[in-house]
Amino acid sequence: MRRRITKTILIIGTLVSILFFLSCTKKGGQNTLYLFNWTYYTPDEIIERFEKEFNVKVVLDNYASNEELYTKLKASRGGYDIVIPSADYTSIMIKQDMLLPLDHSKLPNLKYIEEKARQLSEQYDPGYQYSVPYFIGAAGVAVNTDKVKEYPRDWTIFGQKELAGKMQLLDDMHEVLGIAQATLGFSVNTTDPDELAQVADLINTEWKPNIIKFDAEAMGKAFNQGEYWVSHTYPENIFEEVPEEMWDSIDFFLPEDGGPLYIDSMVILANAPNPDIAHEFINFFHRPEIYAIFLDEFRYPSTVNSAADEFRESEPFYAMEMLDNYELKVDLGEHLDKYNAIWQTIRYH
């Protein structure tokens, strides 16, 4: 009799353990979206609304550069559903079979994508086979006008010796080389050795001596605290950290000389744990009223979703027309080593 009771208890215990495991798996797996995005790039309200409507949990991690994203994915072999690389790294990931082909039947809101975004994406992913545009923009310059009164409103500001020790450049190879290339009148994707040598010389001899730090993560906090008076940055990094009552003392501008243009896109990893939920999120994000929340959060111009302006409540920090002179960063392929070699001289010498 005791054997029978003991056996029954063991069976019940096993069943309870299995049910508990299945419950945990459902909670942490198929009902969870694992999202890996840039810092300051995912409005909490959008996450909360998606979680409520689809009864899922969103787990969000952040990165500060494409290089960081790519390195982590290669080291961890995935673990995320959606990541949001820029065009050059989207191209690399497509070529390396890291991405899942998209099911367009699950993405009816692709109809809202702007024509310019479609044209740009044709350069690296024709027909949105693997990626859906998230945002098109550019890094610019933020100046604390309480501290700096006279300055050129272009990239040569980083050559101003009187501002030495109060300026920062992004810790991002293609962005930093790109603004120097634009300053010299070159393509931001040039592979000409002579042009690249001039780019390296400009940065190392005229800009770098004035730079306190290469920073792609904490520039907003440092700018707010007065460590930086001039920052090479994205607007969201600054305006998310500086109290709104102080915005009048910030001059954020995109130099007319142009520079690197980025198009960040949502992609689903080939080994994504939950590709169906990932498709739901991409489609949800591009509902015009949802995308407007994204625009309002960061005061962005509507560069991707053509219908969202109807629902937005804010004025953007810069106009779409300011991007006209900016050039899309592309995958450099076999020429990437040339850029890496120059970046080594800038960052580590």
Image: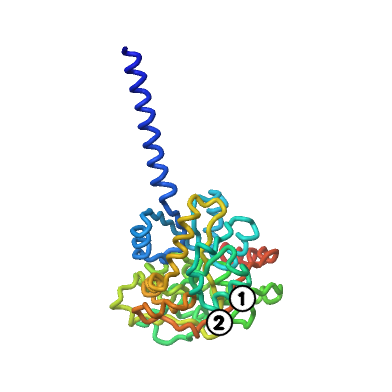
- Residue 247 in view in this figure: yes
Q: Tell me if mark 2 has few (under 14), some (14-19) or many (20+) residues whose alpha carbon lies within 10 angstroms of its own.
A: many
Q: Position of residue 181 (x, y in %)?
A: 61, 77
Q: Is 168 placed above or below 47 here?
A: below
Q: Position of residue 278 (x, y in %)?
A: 47, 58
Tag 2 residue: 258
Give the residue at x 53% y 49%.
Answer: 76
Quadrant of the rendered structure where residue 190 is? bottom right
The location of residue 169, given as percent across then percent down, is 49, 71
Residue 167 drawn at (x, y percent): 45, 74
Residue type at mark 2 is Gly
Could you say which is closer to the camera, residue 205 or residue 338?
Answer: 338
The answer to whether any part of residue 236 appears in the image is no
For the point 35% across and 69% down, the residue is: 241
17 vs 141, nearest the viewer: 17
**SS for tag 1?**
loop
Residue occupied by mark 1: 188
Q: Are marks 2 and 1 in contact (CB under 8 Å)?
A: yes
**Callout 1 amino acid:** Val
Q: In the rendered view, tell whether residue 232 sits above or below residue 322.
A: above
The quarter in which the N terminus is drawn is top left
